[in-house]
Structure formats: C-alpha cells, structure tokens
Amino acid sequence: MSAALKTWVKSRNTPLSRFAYCAFTSLRTLRVPVIRPLHRTLYAIHLAVQRTIWESTRILWYTPLFVSRLETPAPGLLLYSGMPQVIGKLRIRVGRGSRISGKSTFIGRSGNAAAPLLDIGDNVDIGWQSTISVGTRIEIGDNVRLAGKCMLAGFPGHPMDPADRAAGLPDTPDQIGDIVLERDVWLATGVTVLAGVRIGRATVVAAGSVVTRDLPPGVLAAGVPARVIRSLAADPAG
C-alpha cells in the first residue's frame, strides 16, 4: 500500500475511507476459531520441532565453530540462543561447564601489539546481550555469574580529546586496563565494570551499577559509581 493511500485510509474523512479502514483493521485481526485440544497439540508439536532444530544447530554447528576459535577445549560448554559474536584480535580461553549466551559479544582491542586475552573460568554464566571488551586482559573466575546486558569495558574505543575522536583516532594507552572478577562474583542485570577494576571473591554488584574502582571480597555493592552497601553473611574465604 502506497504512503498516499495509507494516509487516505487513516484519515477516515470520507465514507469510503472509513469503510476501507474498518475493512483493513478487521482483516488484520482475522483469525480462525481456537479449538483447544487441537491447537494445544499443535502448539506442543511446534515447541518440540523448534527445540529439535535449536538443539541440533547448537550441537552440530554453533558449538564446534565457536570452540574452534578458542585456545582451550571448553568441555561441557553450553551455548544457547546462537553463537557469541567475536570482534577483533582476541585470544579466548573457556574452562569447564560454562554457559554462554549466543547473544553476547566479545571484542578485542585491535591496536595492541599482542592479542588481548579473555580468560573465562569453570562454571561461568555469561548472560544475554552482555558485552566484554578486552583491552589487554579480562579474567573471569570460577562460578562467576554475569546477568543480562552486563558490560566489561577494558577499553573505551575512543580517545578523550574531541579533535582526536573526530579524526577517528583510537583510545590512548592510559584508558586501557585489565579487569579481574574473582571467583563467585555475581554481576546483576546491566552492571558496567570499567578498565583497571578488580572485584573481590563472592562480591555481588546490584543491577544497573557502574563499577569504577576495586571492590573488596564478600560485599554487596550498588550505585553509580558503585560503593559498598554492606558485608555479606557468607565468608568468601571459606
């Protein structure tokens, strides 16, 4: 339907345009009657077929392709929702039994002399739409949990000087730093961790926080910038 015809139908300022609008909206919402036993059976079949296709693709395609990109065999790796996007020059190690969303992105800074390293431990979760930008090294310890839309920003991608940004120059060495998440850390949804930060063992960072400096082990932190809210009952050294 052309733009002019759409405008005329939506205007409904003539009997014909009003009739056309009603006819179009009726057709748009048209559906067959629901026969619950039939359609519930068809729905179950749909889910089974969909799951079979997803699992087959994961086993036969996404997992072997992604593991071929790694420096380690990553036994027990579970990819879900596809395959992570890997951008730039980046070395990746993944430990045993980790789960990684296929909607995540791993980026290596291209201006380094040596390829940056992303080192993921055992039993790690990396959630949906998380982004890990590795300046030199990012270490994610065993049992770490990254919820959806987390960002580990080991480099910013652009310089602070506006003229350099306008010229398309890369970020400067002082903007780059390692990030270390010690074992048992949990980053809730939407947490951002900046370059040069170490988060201590078993620390939990609340949703939406921005971590700009080191956090000690065994605490709950929150805010922008993140600060320690309280100590956690569990002993992180235990």
Image (spheres, grey):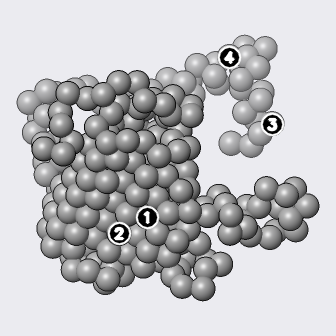
- Contact between marks 3 and 2 (CB within 8 A): the answer is no
The mark that comes first in sequence, 1 or 3, is 3
Select label 1 or label 4 by which is in front: 1
Residue located beneath label 2 in the image = 119
- Contact between marks 1 and 2 (CB within 8 A): the answer is yes
Tell me how far mark 1 sits from mark 2, CA to CA.
6 Å
**Residue 152 in picture, x, y percent from top left:** 49, 54
Q: Is mark 4 on a helix, strand or loop?
A: helix
Residue located beneath label 3 in the image = 4
Q: Is residue 66 above or below residue 2?
A: below
The mark that comes first in sequence, 3 or 2, is 3
**Residue 212 in picture, x, y percent from top left:** 56, 44
Residue located beneath label 4 in the image = 18
Please, what is the three-letter code of the amino acid marked with disc 4? Arg
Q: Residues within 10 Å of mark 2 (few under 14, many from 20)?
A: some
Q: Is mark 3 on a helix, strand or loop?
A: helix
Please, what is the three-letter code of the amino acid marked with disc 2? Asp
Please, what is the three-letter code of the amino acid marked with disc 1? Ile
Select label 3 or label 2 by which is in front: 2
The mark that comes first in sequence, 1 or 4, is 4
Q: Quadrant of residue 112?
A: bottom right
* Image mark for residue 138: 1
